[in-house]
Image (cartoon, rainbow, N blue to C red):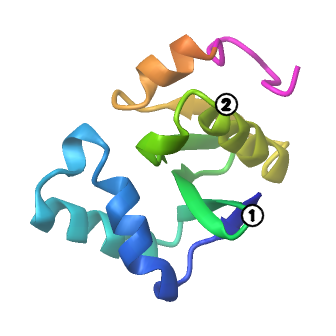
Amino acid sequence: MLIRYKKAFEKIAMGLLSFMPNEKDLKKLQQTMKQYEEGDNWQLYLWKAEDDIIGLIGAVIEDDTIEIQHICVNPSHRHEGIGKSMVKAMKQLHADKKLCPTEETLAFFEKCCFLNEENPDD
């Protein structure tokens, strides 16, 4: 289940974000977290399964698009469909908007066949 990021989850979120190739540097990671905390259009969500937070998805929400900036899943929970579930949940939250990847999330979108789909829920 997607839950909205809160400051109390900062360490967990930073740990998950650090799995993204472009977020390995601590200063870059801190800048990204600040952007999610302060940016009006930047939204960060965590994926909670039972009592554990095991994934993260971050996006820039514009008038008619959701640009997925980050998709991260704890390595011990990968290949279980969690990333795909997070994208579907984002689409459900913003059903009136089109999903699009960034350069960093493009390969994931291609792997999951989200590109050129109007509705990834199918």
Assess whether residue 81 is covered by the magenta stretch: no
What is the quadrant of residue 37 in the picture?
bottom left
Q: Residue at x 46, y 48 (%)?
A: 74
What is the quadrant of residue 46 in the picture?
bottom right
Q: Eyeballing the image, is 77 above or below 93? A: above
Q: Where does the C terminus fall, quadrant-wise?
A: top right
Find the magenta span and give its range: 113-122
Q: Identify the mark at residue 81; answer none if there is no mark.
A: 2
Is 7 placed left or right of 18 in the picture?
right
Q: Eyeballing the image, is 38 above or below 31? A: below
* Residue 88 appears in the rendering: yes
Residue denoted by label 1: 50
Q: Identify the mark at residue 11; answer none if there is no mark.
A: none
Q: Residue at x 66, y 18 (%)?
A: 114
Q: Residue at x 79, y 20 (%)?
A: 118
Depth check: give the residue in front, 110 or 16. 16
Q: CA distance from mark 1 to mark 2?
A: 16 Å
Q: Does dot 1 land on a helix, a strand or a loop? A: loop
What amino acid type is highlighted by mark number 2? Gly
Q: Does dot 2 land on a helix, a strand or a loop? A: loop
Assess whether residue 121 is covered by the magenta stretch: yes
What amino acid type is highlighted by mark number 1? Glu
Depth check: give the residue in front, 91 or 98. 91
Q: Where does the N terminus fall, quadrant-wise?
A: bottom right
